[in-house]
Image (cartoon, rainbow, N blue to C red):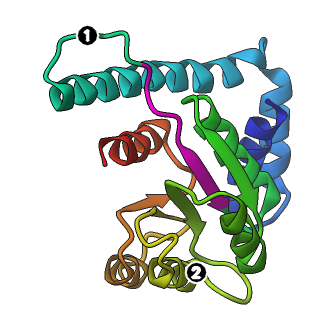
Amino acid sequence: MVVILILFVNAAKRADGGGGTRLAGAAEDARAMSGRAFLYTAVFDDARKYTDMSQTIENQSTERRQGRDTTTVPPRKLNLLVVDDNQEVGESLAMLLETFGHSVVVVRNWQMAVEQVKQCVPDAVYLDIEMPGISGIEIGRRLRNNPDTANAVLVAVTGHSLPMYMDDALTVGFRHFLVKPVRIEDLATTVQSVLAG
């Protein structure tokens, strides 16, 4: 839960260009909140709401495929991989994805991603676009060209919504493009898209 507060502070830091004025204000605002739990609870209440929606969609999809009417079929548990060189951001994203009931692993670079894929092929990969060394776009290209991960849904995650990033992501085969800070409803949409196939 502390990680969600870190995102709140990081957002203030970015808005201030890395300076301390807005950061100090954000920390002060956070301390002044009568119940810090509200900041966390609001996020996870939304996550639970979208989890319920995700389960309903998966159940309906299963019913249509099997030609029967039942709501007792549990949703499929996804294996999700988050690749982000910023550990706090990666773990925060993973925490939110886990509230949807899925397994999430966070790695910080291409080499770690390769090792993780050997252990468990992901259903979807959330890639930070701007990383030192090999960019998220290039990692996506390599995953797409690997027979083991060619069918994994690629999700771009970036702090910038520049057209060139979107074009590159589309060319490589990314299905979704999320701008940080990621909205819970957009994250839910990506999970529902993976479940729908």
Secondary element at image label 1: loop
* Residue 5 on image: x %, y %: 77, 37
Please state which of residues 25 and 89 is positioned toward the viewer in this rendering.
89
* Residue 2 on image: x %, y %: 83, 34
* Residue 124 on image: x %, y %: 50, 56
User: Neighbour class for label 1 at 10 Å: few (<14), some, many (≥20)?
Assistant: few
* In the image, residue 139 lies in the stretch drawn in magenta: no
The disc label shown at residue 187, or none? none
For the point 59% across and 60% down, the residue is: 121
Identity of the amino acid at label 1? Thr
Secondary element at image label 2: helix
Residue 130 left/right relative to 17: left
* Residue 72 on image: x %, y %: 37, 10
Please state which of residues 84 and 28 is positioned toward the viewer in this rendering.
84
User: Neighbour class for label 2 at 10 Å: few (<14), some, many (≥20)?
Assistant: many
Circle 1 or circle 2, nearest the eye: 1
In the depicted structure, whether residue 78 falls above or below residue 101: below
Please state which of residues 90 and 124 is positioned toward the viewer in this rendering.
124
Locate residue 107: give its quadrant.
Answer: bottom right
Residue 49 left/right relative to 28: left
- Looking at the rendering, the stretch of residues picked out in magenta corresponds to 74-82
Residue 54 left/right relative to 3: left
The disc label shown at residue 70, or none? 1
In the depicted structure, whether residue 100 falls above or below residue 87: above
Q: CA distance from mark 1 to mark 2?
A: 40 Å
Give whichever of discs 1 and 2 has the lower sequence position.
1
Q: Would you name the residue on which mark 2 appears?
A: 139
